[in-house]
Structure formats: structure tokens, C-alpha cells
Image (cartoon, helix red, strand yellow):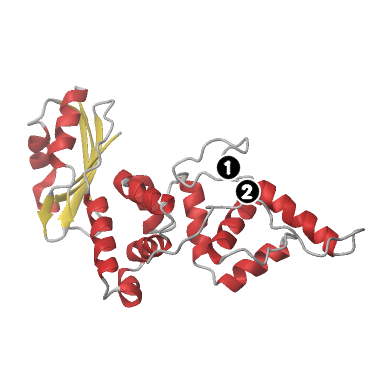
Amino acid sequence: QPLRWHPRYMTSAALICAAAASFLVGGGPRAPAALPRASRIIAAIDYKDPAVAAEFQKVQERPIELVEAEIEKSGVPVPPSLNEMDMRLMLVELRMRKAGTMPGGGKAAPKKPASYGSKYEEALWEKPAFKRLIDDYRARGNTNALNLATEYLNSPRQAADRYAGTGAYDETVAAIDAAMSAKVEQQVTSGRVAFGGFPAAMGEAAIRMTLEGFGPLASLSVDVSDDGLSCRGAAEFETVEAAKACIDKYDGVDMGLGTTLEFKAL
């Protein structure tokens, strides 16, 4: 069964309450005999934000003992009533506030990275259906599914070793696979496209002929990939409509031998 936890995260108000409680216990005047629980108000972190998701993944990979130690080292006491999930979410907020990367903190919206730290992070940016699935797991507090999704993308064998053999595993993996294979609807605003996956044996002439089936080309460049087995390159159609038609037909087409055509609007 999914872990149950509520609410989803500790806010800045909760952190301030916890710090104030620490001051009183540490020797402030008229310390109370029993500390009230820190109030938790749903407000601070947007877990649909890819930057937050990436930081959450890093925290998830740390043993809970190290998570607690890092929070304590920052000067914020961990309330005894805090469960493991809330503790991890508390550390996410602490880290991002310290780094100045909290969403809505006056910083510019996170930009798509030039490279990704993991396949999970890449999927959050590149696969809208997968991101929607992860958002749904978070909204329902399905920690088991979140952990499985992270490990399944980054290390499928490890995920199978840890979680396989249950109906929940089969159901979750099927949902992840469906989300990953869902066709991405690209926004095509120009005639320029980048492509990859054509067999190297086709050569530029055959690729040109294939693409011109959708309309005249203004330019075309083709290079053989590092493995020598496929071609990649860029093309510019004279019309946006031709570029969109090409992407709709060929992006994601299986060319056999483990090769898939990839077309991306530029």
C-alpha cells in the first residue's frame, strides 16, 4: 500500500516555529513544559517544478539518518513528530532556500538544462505524459510509485530486484512504460527540424528525397553518427506545414535493430 502522509510538505512558517522552539529549549526564559507541534500550512513548494523534482530525487537517494543530520547541521531542529517523508521534503526546502533556487523566490523560472543528470530528470523535461504521471503520484502521496519510477528509469535491473513480484509493481511499470512511449505533441513554429536515426547507408541523397516528399527544402545537412550506424542532421523546409507533417509522420518510427527515428522542431 502507498505510504500515507499529510500534509505534503513543511513550509517556511513551520521552519521558523521549529527554530523558535529550539531557542526556548536551549535556555530561553520561561520555556514551556511541552512544546506544541509546529503548524504545517500548505503553501511553499510547487512539486510540479522540474527543479524541485530534481532536488527531491537527490534527497530521496540519501539514507534518512543523513537527511536528519543535514537538517540539524543547518541549525533547524527536526520535530520528533516528523515522519520520514516530511523530513525529506523539509530538506528539499532548506537546500533550495539556501541556494536561492526556490520557485517564486524572485529567481527566474528554471530553464531547461543543457544536459541531464539522470534519465529520470530527462523524462521530466522531455516526456509530458511521464511528468503528468509523476505529478499524480505526488498528489496522491504514492511514495512507493515515486521511488519505483525513479529507480526504474535510472536503473531498471535494480528496480526489478527491489520491487518486482507484486501486482503493484506490474501496474506501476505498465503506467510508466505507457507514459514514456506516449507521443509528444511538438509545437512547430518554423520550417527547421533536427533529426537522427536514419541508417547510415541511406546517405544524404536518399534522406533528401525522403524529406522532400513533404515539401521543398531550403537547406539540409547530414552527418554520420559516432557509431557509424546512423545519420543525424538538420533540415529546413520552406513551410511550417511541411515541417509539421514530417515530424508527425516520422518522429518515433521504429527503424529496426533498436533504432528509432527522432525529429525535433527547432
Residue 40 screen position, x and y as percent = 62, 50
**200 displayed left or right of 104:** left
Could you tell me the amino acid type at mark 1?
A: Ala
- Identify the residue at image location x=32%, y=77%: 161
Q: Is residue 212 above or below residue 261?
A: above
The picture places residue 29, in percent across and down from the top left corner, at 92, 58
Q: Earlier in the sequence, mark 2 or mark 1?
A: 2
Q: Quadrant of the N terminus?
A: bottom left
Picture residue at 7% right of the left edge, 36% below the top: 209
Q: Which residue is mark 1?
A: 43
Mark 2: few/some/many CA within 10 Å (<14, 14-19, 20+)? some
Q: Is residue 257 left or right of residue 137?
A: left
Please determine whether, in this image, residue 166 is positioned above or below residue 85: below
Q: Quadrant of the C terminus?
A: top left
Left or right of 230, for residue 59? right
Residue 11 circle label: 2
Q: Amino acid at mark 2?
A: Thr
Q: What residue is at 35 percent from the left and 68 percent from the top? A: 155
Residue 35 in sight in this render: yes
Q: Secondary structure at mark 1?
A: loop
Query: Which residue occupies the extreme right position in the image?
Result: 29
Residue 223 shows in the view: no
Q: Position of residue 8 (x, y in %)?
A: 52, 52
How many neighbours does mark 1 have within 10 angstroms: few (below 14), some (14-19), or many (20 or more)? few
Distance between mark 2 and mark 1 Cα atoms: 6 Å
Q: Residue at x 52, y 55 (%)?
A: 6
Q: Nearer the viewer, residue 83 or 90?
A: 83
Q: Do callouts 2 and 1 mark residues in contact (Cβ within 8 Å)?
A: yes
| Left-right relation of 108 to 97 | left
